[in-house]
Image: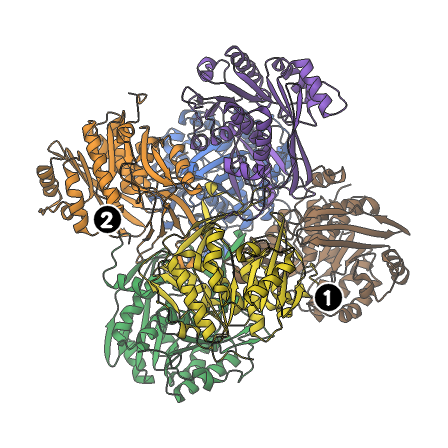
Chain colours: A green, B brown, C blue, D yellow, E orange, F purple
């Protein structure tokens, strides 16, 4: 199967630059900061393209060299950026990350107010063109949280994707600093009818959908029942310590539950695990993989994300296969 | 003479964090950036305090760890920050610096929109308290350029300073990215009547005051005549190359011209030279120095600024004295 | 409660610069070293001031730029350094740290011989002035160990503090490289009558006081009985591995024992934990906190110290509160 | 004019990784090295694409992560790499660079023996497909110097390009470490009939073509006469010192000579200047620029290359325009 | 016992440079790499010399500054390099290391093809001179795997060592990227008769000798029986996670089994553990230590290797003694 | 000519570690420092050995890992350190270097008080053994300046060297921070009768010998006349700017003057130029070179020193030959 006829996956969301002091320094101790490109939907496209499923990332950027840095990184993996608008208004969003060590959790300080994306005039994106030839559309709950204009555009995008017959993927990706749980629930409820694949951190799904259930399985079942999702995925992270996490996922698809392996990981950088998961999951589906296989693959890929610095997952197909084959930790020579 | 009774110098303006990729990398090449604290009036207070004339810096900062980094650096030199307001609204302004090499000039990309300082509600600062016990007040043209509210506050501050009998220092510090020459001229004209010591880059003074003159001396004379300044200082920089500049100043005070030495400097980092100059000039005055001696001292101090990285001048009294005594470049052991 | 009338806490001791090769390099592998400011009583003042209880640090420094680096860092947190004497005699003490990994313990190589502090002429410090307005005085066993002159000055300081009605805090901080257990016991015995709050690593208290007891509680009780301390605190560290320690404290105060939580910490840098503890404990007391609350707060603060590089604790009030509220290790956004 | 129908420029040559110790360290002093992607024809494609003329780079790479690093960088600027073959045989060529300071010149130590490119089996590249839709083909004298197989393939490529009606650009790029002047002259003579645009360092053109002439202009004229080139460009560098070079070019085109400006540059990194020149020249031509304008543009662009680290030129259209407009060295804000 | 009369230990093998991106970056993420000297037999000589048993390292190097870096490092510990041949043919072998974090294992990508050592003309080394005065000769299975010429030279060396009455040490050091298990078994079988001390990773010994046995002890016994080794050592590593390994060894010598302690180590860098073990083991023997004491010492030394970056073990006699005395992990002051 | 029979050159003096903040930071701005090994006579031995004239360095070091770092670096070039005494008393001397930029000169802050070398008990060195087989002995004016004991030992060493028939080299190397000109003159006068080759910075020779003369040539002549030196060398440095120096030397030998070339150098690091000069000069003599040739060689070598960081000169024979052949600054490929 090839992708000649178009980009199989389209994602929509803001990119940010991430600044973090090296060596577990706090921000007050910083004299230099490492710079990484970030952004939930950006990372999904990056991972998908890297794994062989070329993706298009749709966004709005200010016209400056920092945006070029963002674009270069996307293009380096073959992500199509031809539908990224550049404007003279607004900034590139940033965030500052303090990497933690037990008992100090990692901390993110957002500086994304006034971003070009959040200010975008409604209707700036030609969704017909942007979705042309695609099979999957992905957006996360961060995009509608950016501003009312972004929430509106998200809805337009979801409608356009459904109309065009795409499979729609949505990750709640709840950020308490952007909106309250109530706002999130209310704004996103209309989206739910347009979603095929819903991904969410296990501990928040109930709150965001307004569902109570006895356990995770019951919760997934209730979600499917109420909203008609084809696939519901709960991702689970256990923070044993700051440097030792475990990561797994539970999927309900076509009435059947699938449990991924539960990976205990050494944490080099845990940011971006969920986005890597979605990127790999969609990449596998778009290449004809089964949802069950995609879940196993994507969980391993997201586990690998923790082993490298930055927001993006640089693991390869081969790395994932090594993990799936038993993840022997001897030096690979 | 001591400073027990108060802070001799008060400055008012925004602080920013500066991010710059090391090793002459362009922003697109950046994988890490050096972090420095910046801000014109912040730097004036820093230099003055460092040279033994404790100063108070008045400003508005958002309540986050980046602001603490700014405050720590000020306090490290004894700058009084008790009149810096912290608010929940707005960001800390940033800028990105690409250090240049001939024929590529250094480039600054500002990201200061929406800063806490620019959004400050009028009347937030109690100028009576903030100026209490002070003898000099300094502000630069960057502050009124930030927003109409800041322009208004600048005028309030200047009036308060004059009413309290302080000597008022003003540095045009024109930034084309913040406003046009016309806006700058118009907004600042009412300030001029309240200014005692005016500092400006030699090439811009005429345009900012709306004066034409045959040469720099005539220009200074016309400025004094028209606005009644006690002291006018023109700073002069010649960019022979990116790494080799020369720096000098001309002063008209009490009817007499004083020319500083003309320093040819190796450029490690040229940002902040002018602010260092003003800080040193006021420090010298406040310690009872003559304007002529202050000019000589401050020019040497600003020349030294070019020899060290960052926006602030870490030269010492001893360093300046070495330069003034003939600046022998042998290793000092 | 405010601190307008004076510095609530005064500490007395030597500052050092710490040099350590990054990345677990041994000293023989070093091509560069990270530089940090250190010093037990310096760190106590730093932590107290950072937590909102302005402190005065009393010491002796040689007159050179390295000392300025030490002073800048103290002043950055508002520590009052007006009673630090600068002399032309002696050096700034240094130490070299090799960060360890199991089974290689971290190693400190001191280079503090001939320091300005250790050479200080008796009577150089005006204790009446230095202690004016203070409520707490703190010194550790490192100061008297530096030299006979320092031991003598410690005794003078303790007497002055008691005479002035201050609460006296003492941390044994035993360093085998400076003196033997016998010397330490003998020199410090006369100090004990002047101490209100005694802090000591649990494993050494008996040896330093010359007391034998069945267990830690009995030991604390015997110490109180023999020397009349108001408060005895035993700090406990368990080095599970070089990168995983646990940290807790036991306090006997007013006849009652208080146990802190026992924190298992990821070790970024374990140096300075004890000093951070004392700084936070005194800061809490000076703000009117109960000894029990102060113990809980200070233990969490010291646990946080392990999560950041350097000798000083940059944790904030907010960080401590997060830990005390259950220390969830999710990313704080 | 758009490029929808194809890649306007195709280049053919080896990519290498460059390792260089930072801070003017010699290789013997190295404990770390900066890593950059290099390669003459790779750099031409990179610069052209960056300046808006998408290019295809044709090459052979071994199948490993270092090659991915090479590909990522090319793709980041939109360079088409779909005709880069990956093989299991051979290595990625490397070189080690010691950056110089007068009187020590910079030194390159090649480690490119056994590279995948040099070992490539004849006929591995489908030139019809690789050149489809292109208007310019570029290769330099490094490619045929790699191995007899590469020399043969170069000839095939040149024939294919001419047959397909492309304009052929050739840069002698003589490397004494790869072959002797005699070998270079003999091997490349047959190529000359197929070349439209010939670029060469001024001091070597005569020796490589076997022509003697009184001066540079006469030399260019004789070259055109003998080989029928449409355009001959002589690039000139004067190494005043290691850190101060001048750079200019002379072109003979359609019987007329054009002299570029002569740029005196601060040398951050002089490697890659010539390749940047060619990339910019072809990009300008392909966008419909005149050869004279292209020469002026490309010389400025190559001058800018010296101001940034690495083998590639990250200057932008805007940077070049600033230089062409008089290259004021004031900070651009 | 002194070593005046000669070098007690001679080793024979290739040196390589190792390049690895810092901070757990993957190779694709690299912008700089740390440089370390590596090579199995090189490391054995380095460790032996460092521990007081001067060693001679015999090898072949190309004539360039990278080789000087290799030689400098060896000489820095007193390793005798007077029998290292420099040739104009061939390269210095390299390898690239990606440091892993669970579930991503560390990965080594070799780039040693065409090395000067692998191309060496037979008979280039004068073994009589090279072995003069020595008591131990060591080579590992990497040397014969490099090329048929190296395999031949290994056999010559082993014969020469036996003829000269040296004790011969051999470490299988199997590298799957250099040859298959079958090739390794076949090529090395003739060597076995010439070996006194055989070291091997526990999991591979059976496969390499073609022996099946119920457990490790039986395996060692069978090996001794079949090949007449004086000493067989099985090293055991358990990769609990990428950052937590355990390390121990089992020895069969003179009919008796010795078990070392089992060290759980924090992994800073696990490469080179086995070579450090052999170096320390031979150093202890050459200083008159018993095999049992040498085993205990060498296991502790190899455990210490994991705590420092690079391929070489910089631990000291004192460090080992600290570990052997119970390895208390308190800070050593 | 070979050196089998002994070390041709013996030097005597203290080693120090040098700490300097990177990137032209002042000490107050330092957060890390680069570490280099330094020491005048150490550097002479290093350079001589590196250029093929094995040397012995005689000194006293404290017993710690920093000393091992010093020894490793010496041994890496084959310097014989078997006559370096290790003691339990005293420290390793340090110095801190701030690298300058015009108008800020580089600054050295010594921290060498209490060094093991300066405290050495008289008679600790067995000069008969230490000088055995040598042909040249070198010491500089820093050694006697360290302490009266060191001055005494210098005299003993000079007598021993003369008695043993060695050629004695002396470099005044005046350090104003160690002693006054008067002390230097008085202490060293007795040494002069024992010196064959005297080296001195041109501007200080007259003051140190107590000679007045019209010009440099006359000064050299008078020195020879008064003290009977075989060779007098005046080294000349002109600090055009901090980053641009010129370096040359004038020699009077056997009644004839020789002028070296005058090198204009780019200054990466100017420390150690003079010591490199002496090392190269003696190496050339010891290899049978003429004084005139040695002067030319050594001046070029010292000029090269400026092009690399650190106190030691890593230039090679080949580098010097390149400079002597006209120092073309093109990239050497």
Residue at 43%, 37% (x, y): give it. C27
Circle 2 residue: E238
Compared with residue B321, is residue F291 higher up or lower down, i.e. above or below? above
Residue farthest to the bottom? Answer: A163
Q: Residue A58 carries which label?
A: none
- Tag 2 secondary structure: strand
Chain hosting mark 1: B
Circle 1 residue: B144
Residue at 79%, 51% (x, y): give it. B249
Q: Is residue C163 left or right of residue A206?
A: right
Residue F264 x, y percent position in the rendering? 65, 40
Give the position of the N terminus of chain D as an image quadrant. Answer: bottom right
Q: In this view, does D133 lie to the left or right of F171?
A: left
Viewer-proximal residue among C208 and B151: B151
- Tag 1 secondary structure: helix
Alpha carbons under labels 2 and 1: distance apart: 66 Å
Q: Is residue E282 visible?
A: yes
Residue C91 x, y percent position in the rendering? 57, 31
**CB atoms of marks 2 and 1 within 8 Å:** no
Give the position of the C terminus of chain D as an image quadrant. Answer: bottom right
What is the crowding at mark 1: few (fewer than 14 residues within 10 Å), some, or many (at least 20)? Answer: many
Q: Can residue D271 be seen in this view?
A: no
Q: Determine the image quadrant of residue E120.
A: top left
Viewer-proximal residue among F9 and B294: F9
Chain hosting mark 2: E
Compared with residue D48, is residue B284 higher up or lower down, i.e. above or below? above
Residue at 41%, 25% (x, y): give it. C182
**Mark 2 or 1, which is nearer the eye?**
2
């Amino acid at each position: 199967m090839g992708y000649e006829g178009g980009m199989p996956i389209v994602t929509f969301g803001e990119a940010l630059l991430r600044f973090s002091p090296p060596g577990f320094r706090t921000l007050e101790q910083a004299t230099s900061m490492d710079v990484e490109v970030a952004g939930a939907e950006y990372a999904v496209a990056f991972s998908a393209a890297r794994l062989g499923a070329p993706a298009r990332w749709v966004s709005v950027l200010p016209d400056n060299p920092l945006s070029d840095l963002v674009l270069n990184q996307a293009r380096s993996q073959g992500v199509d950026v031809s539908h990224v608008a550049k404007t003279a208004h607004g900034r590139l969003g940033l965030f500052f990350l303090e990497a933690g060590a037990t008992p100090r959790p990692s901390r993110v300080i957002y500086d994304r107010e006034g971003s070009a994306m959040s200010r975008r005039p409604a209707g700036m994106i030609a969704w017909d063109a942007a979705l042309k030839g695609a099979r999957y559309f992905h957006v996360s709950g961060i995009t509608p949280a950016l501003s009312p204009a972004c929430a509106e555009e998200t809805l337009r995008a979801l409608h356009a994707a459904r109309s065009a017959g795409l499979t729609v993927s949505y990750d709640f990706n709840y950020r308490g600093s952007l909106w309250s749980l109530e706002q999130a629930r209310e704004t996103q409820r209309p989206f739910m009818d347009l979603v095929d694949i819903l991904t969410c951190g296990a501990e928040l799904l109930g709150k965001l959908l307004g569902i109570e259930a006895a356990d995770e399985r019951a919760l997934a079942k209730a979600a499917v029942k109420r909203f008609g999702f084809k696939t519901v995925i709960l991702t689970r992270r256990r923070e044993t310590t700051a440097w030792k996490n475990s990561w797994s996922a539970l999927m309900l698809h076509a009435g059947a539950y699938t449990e991924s392996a539960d990976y205990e990981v050494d944490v080099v950088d845990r940011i971006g695990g969920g986005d890597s998961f979605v990127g790999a999951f969609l990449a596998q589906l778009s290449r004809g993989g089964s949802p069950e296989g995609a879940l196993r693959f994507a969980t391993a890929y997201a586990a690998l994300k923790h082993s490298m610095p930055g927001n993006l997952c640089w693991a390869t197909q081969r790395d994932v296969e090594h993990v799936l084959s038993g993840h022997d930790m001897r030096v690979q020579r």
